[in-house]
Image (cartoon, rainbow, N blue to C red):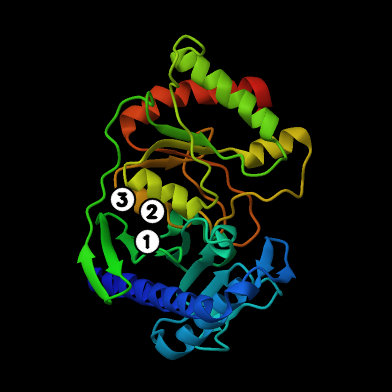
Amino acid sequence: MTIRDQHRARRLLCQLQDHIRDTIIAARAKHAKSFARVAAVTAADTIYHVDRLSEHAILDWFEAHWPRAWPVEVVMEGLEDGKAVTFPKGTPVARTIFKCILDPIDGTRNLMYDKRSAWILGALAPQRGARTHLGDITVAAMTEIPTTKQWRADQLSAIRGQGIMAEAVNLLEGTRRKLKLTPSCERNCLGGFASFSRFFPEGKALTSQIEEKMWDELYGLGQQASPLVFEDQYITTGGQLYEIIAGRDRFIADIRPLVFRKIGCTQPLTCHPYDICTALIAQEAGCIIEAPLGGSLRQPLDTTSAVGWVGFANLALARHIRPVLRRILKEILGV
């Protein structure tokens, strides 16, 4: 893709996500009570009525707006019936030139109960069939779906090697302004927010054991009256990435796949490729996003692969935490 093509692709992802956000907000005003109704249970997750609304909005938008000269395969949560979804419709996957992975609503439960913003996530990679993985992503965008009391929704996007673009959208007036987001430059986590994802009961005890041991080795626990590190269980990977990009969180670890493997759990929900497909945006902002034991994320762009990941706001934090975390993971989990 030329630079011009990359920017066009970025704008298309942002326009798609604007459409999804506006569709969901409009539907919420009329049918909020039905949002929490279960629509289906798939291999990836439970699908709610609100998810179905966004899926229809996506398919309609691709049919009407995606360039016919750019045949694309669309991969997203909710489309796990075994049939490939391509645009223009009916294009064989082998003839598509892009793979687009989407999470229509990352943080559905937050949105259903009007607790906290959810996020629309999307990314584009050159089509390499089943070999296409997270590391192939060249363009990504993420858009906030706010709670009912919010008038502003942020939108972030990035092209590999060109930094990030961020805007704050005024939903009342329909205006947009540029937004400057800067990750934390702190060199440790003392007095800041840093979290291990443990959203659900399964694996919570083992995850907490790893977390407590790490903080104890780094800073020593029980030696001060005030807390050393604060946590925030934001139940959406997109939201977690946003918090790092915006300078609010310094470190996040999602080691659920490693923990679940250790305790023999095969069904509990983990992060999937569509949840972490916007890692490129955090990386372009200067954050470090990698696998818990090191290396880049290379899971295939599908809806079922489990993804463990860690995020550091800056390189200094990565160098500070990495050695201790990796050693503890090896000691406790035997990985």
As displayed, is residue 199 above or below residue 153?
Answer: above
Q: Earlier in the sequence, mark 3 or mark 1?
A: 1
User: Gap in Å between the C-alphas at discs 2 and 3?
Assistant: 6 Å
Dividing the image into 4 quarters, which one contains the N terminus? bottom left
Q: Earlier in the sequence, mark 1 or mark 2?
A: 1
The secondary element bearing badge 3 is classed as: helix
User: Gap in Å between the C-alphas at discs 3 and 1?
Assistant: 11 Å
As displayed, is residue 309 above or below residue 81?
Answer: above
Q: Which residue is mark 2?
A: 280
The secondary element bearing badge 1 is classed as: loop
227 vs 283, nearest the viewer: 227
Which residue is drawn at the image coordinates 21% and 66% (left, top)? 177
Characterize the local packing of mark 2: few (<14), some (14-19) or many (20 or more) Cα atoms within 10 angstroms. Answer: many
Label 1 vs label 2, nearer the camera:
2
As displayed, is residue 210 above or below residue 134?
Answer: above
Instruction: Count numbered badges in the picture.
Output: 3
In the rendered view, does 296 fall on the left or right side of 154? right
Q: Position of residue 239 (x, y in %)?
A: 45, 52
Q: Are marks 2 and 3 in contact (CB under 8 Å)?
A: yes
Residue 107 is tagged as: none
Report the amino acid beneath label 1: Thr
Report the amino acid beneath label 2: Leu
Characterize the local packing of mark 3: few (<14), some (14-19) or many (20 or more) Cα atoms within 10 angstroms. Answer: some
Q: Which residue is mark 3?
A: 284
Q: Residue furthest front?
A: 149
Q: Position of residue 335 (x, y in %)?
A: 65, 29
Report the amino acid beneath label 3: Glu
Residue 334 appears anywhere in the view: no
Q: Which residue is mark 1?
A: 138
Q: Quadrant of residue 327?
A: top right
Which residue is drawn at the image coordinates 43% and 19% (left, top)? 226
253 vs 190, nearest the viewer: 190
